[in-house]
Image (cartoon, rainbow, N blue to C red):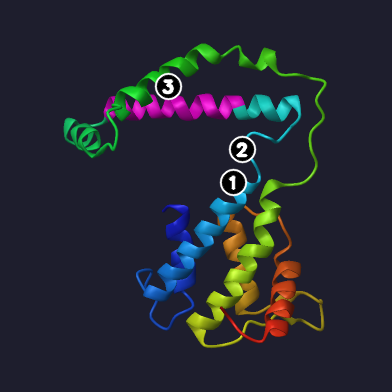
Amino acid sequence: MTREEKIAARLSALTNTPDSTNPEVKKWTEKISLTIFEKWNERRPFSRVVSSTAAKNEIAEFQQLCDRLEKHICSMSKTAVDALRQARSTETDVINLAWQMADQVKLSNGAAKFIKHDQKAQCGQPKLRYAPAVTKILAKAYEEITGKRPTVSVNPIDSKAYGPFFDLVSDIFLILGVDASAESQAKAAVKEFRSEGKTD
């Protein structure tokens, strides 16, 4: 399943008859995806500085992905390749372009030696900036889909948060890879939601 499909499946679980094609589910899935895209653009791609070890791991993963891409292209049928070539929006042959890229990456095995070891890794996780915006959307989606206002309950014995809205936030964060406290974000969203007294 794609990330969007996982989000839709989780949101549809809030309904009495789970259906990822539900208009409300589709609307809120699109809003979440759009928010992530906008926040990612605000981050400015490639502006992050990481440790040399992390950079080497990123390069290795990139090479592995390209290797998989090349192998996948080799295994594709003529039917699929012809369809991709006919569907392209430019004169560029996407199959040849992907093949060339994968082939060129083989020549980048020595890229790690160009990493600047004097650079310090930046603190913080870029995906943290998604958390408040996504949680706010989830609060509105939760109310519209379930007809109930989002709340977060706390177990008096172990002081741990629980409830359907908290579970929703936790699950969506897991799908998106957001390294933030679902509890604190859910509580903050509920507080803001109550202060607004309405949804958009």
- Residue 41 is labelled as 1
Q: Position of residue 40 (x, y in %)?
A: 60, 48
Q: Which amino acid, mark 1? A: Asn
Name the secondary structure under disc 1: helix
Quadrant position of residue 36: bottom right
Image marks 1 and 3: residues in contact by CB distance under 8 Å: no
Q: Position of residue 87 (x, y in %)?
A: 24, 39
- Residue 66 is labelled as none
Name the secondary structure under disc 3: helix
User: Does 61 appear in magenta?
Assistant: yes
Label 3 sits on residue: 102
Q: Position of residue 55 (x, y in %)?
A: 68, 27
Name the secondary structure under disc 2: loop
- First reached walking from the N terminus: tag 3 or tag 2: 2
Q: Is residue 165 above or below residue 67?
A: below
Q: Which amino acid, mark 3? A: Ala
Q: Is residue 18 above or below residue 117?
A: below
Q: Position of residue 69 (x, y in %)?
A: 39, 29
**What segment is highlighted magenta in the picture?**
59-75
- First reached walking from the N terminus: tag 1 or tag 3: 1
Q: Residue at x 34, y 30 (%)?
A: 72
Q: Nearer the viewer, residue 43 or 176?
A: 43
Label 2 sits on residue: 45
Q: Nearer the viewer, residue 133 or 59?
A: 133
Q: How far apart, in angstroms, are the residues tagged by discs 3 and 2? A: 21 Å
Image marks 1 and 2: residues in contact by CB distance under 8 Å: yes
Q: Which amino acid, mark 2? A: Pro
